[in-house]
Every structure is written in structure tokens, then in C-alpha cells.
Amino acid sequence: MTYTRRSKDELARRVAQDIPDGAYVNLGIGQPTLVANHIPAGREVILQSENGILGMGPAPAAGQEDYDLINAGKQPVTLLPGGAFFHHADSFAMMRGGHLDICVLGAFQVSATGDLANWSTGEAGSIPAVGGAMDLAIGAKQTWVMMDLLTKQGQSKIVAHCTYPLTGLACVKRIYTDLATLACTPEGLQLVDMVEGLSIPELEQLIGLPILPA
């Protein structure tokens, strides 16, 4: 196999390309926060954070951090003109009320039918609680996952059935990985795109599941 994996920034840029103008979007902790730095110029995307921010901008420049203005992952953020911050109860009402067009979440596992497991592996150092991910996964109009395709042990994070605690059932519409972008459809996984040099048979071998062509 002769192919190059997408870097974290390249993956974030790939996700940002698909976010439509005018969308209200929540970016989960971890890799998804990088998407804010790659929103195409001229495209208005309104970023929401579950701790109570609407209108987040990209990460601040070095030395310009304000630790009174942070996202749900406790990272310093910027606020675009017209942005606002408010009580997290109002933020969760926004999430649960179906007011977000897209949420982008990390994951430990995603099933071929779109089940999401993203909060606990039962191991030391894993995320200890589900946080707002359950509300986001079900409340947003679309749930996208952004993650590496394989674990450090070389096992696929896309599986036939999740073995970790579930965050949401059949909620994931798209999976963005360092090797390929896949859609979860009623017929199974469907290819959207993949890195140059990788073939569908090779991708199927990595994942261990059949993949419908684009």
C-alpha cells in the first residue's frame, strides 16, 4: 500500500469543506476543535460550544489567549463580531431543541449503521463521562465523526457492532478519517473519497467490512 495519511490539519480542512454557508455547528473536544481554524474564507459558519458560546472564531494567536473565554475542552478560543456567551443550560436547550445543523465529534468506535461510541473504553485515561455528546449526537440535524481510522494497535475504529458504551444509535451520517471519508447509509458504508494511492479493496481489508463505491 503506497498512500499518505491526512494530517490532523488536513483532516480538519476536509471536514470544513463540507460545512455549508450559514450552518450552526458544534465542534466536539479533541480533533474536531481544529475545524474552526479551517473554515473557508467568505463562508459564514456559526460555531457553538456546549459550555455556552455562539459565534466562536479560530484559535487565538500565541500570547493572545484569554482563559476566561474557553470552549468545552477548556481551550482558549476567540469570539467573532456578534458572538455571545450564556448559561450552559441555555446552550443544552439549543442542542436538545434541534437548533444545530451539524455536530462534529471524535469517536472510539462507529458502527456501519451509524452507532456512536465516543466516551469510554473502560481504560485509565479514557473520557470518564459522556458530557454533552449524547445530547449533540441526537439533537443535531447531522452528526459527523472525525477520527483516525485505526487504533494505535492497528484495529479499525469502524466496526460491524460497537463494543464500547454507546453514545447514540444510528446517529452518525458521515465518518471523516485520515484515510477516507465514508457515509453511513441504510445499505451500509459508502465511499465519499479516500487518499490517493488507496483502493477500495485495501480500505475494505483495513476496516473488515464491505464498502459501496462513491
Image (cartoon, helix red, strand yellow):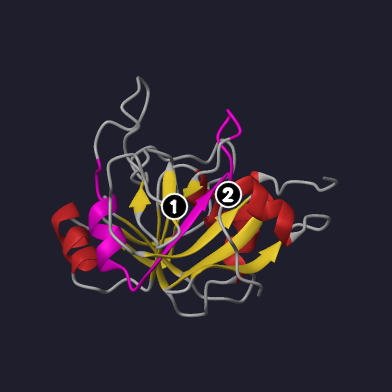
Query: Which residue is label 1 attached to?
Result: 160
Quarter location, residue 114: bottom left
**Residue at 26% in and 64% down:** 138
In the image, the segment drawn in magenta is 130-154
**Mark 1 secondary-structure assignment:** loop
Residue visible at 24% across and 44% down?
Answer: 131
Q: Which badge, 2 or 1, is on the more N-terminal residue? A: 1
**Location of residue 90 in the rendering, given as x and y in whole percent from the top left corner:** 16, 61
Along the line of sight, the residue nearer the viewer: 138 or 115 = 115
The answer to whether residue 54 is magenta is: no
**Image location of residue 48, percent across then percent down:** 35, 61
Query: Residue at the location (58% across, 28% down)?
Result: 153
Front residue of this view, candidates 190 and 5? 190
Q: Position of residue 111 (x, y in %)?
A: 42, 54
Quarter containing the C terminus: bottom right
Left or right, 171 with reference to 155: left
Q: Are marks 2 and 1 in contact (CB under 8 Å)?
A: yes
Viewer-nearest residue: 175 or 16: 175
The residue at which mark 2 appears reads as 208
Amino acid type assigned to the residue bearing label 2 in the image: Gly
On screen, residue 188 versus residue 55, left or right, reads: right
Magenta stretch holds residue 134:
yes
- Name which quarter of the figure residue 27 lies in: bottom left
Instruction: State whether residue 26 appears in this view.
Output: yes
Res 85 visible: no
Quadrant including the N terminus? top right
CA distance separating discs 2 and 1: 9 Å
* Residue at the extreme top of the image, as rendered: 124
In which quadrant of the rendered view does residue 115 lie? bottom left
What residue is shown at x 49% (from left), y 51% (from top)? 32
Question: Given the image, on which type of amino acid does mark 1 rest?
Answer: Ala
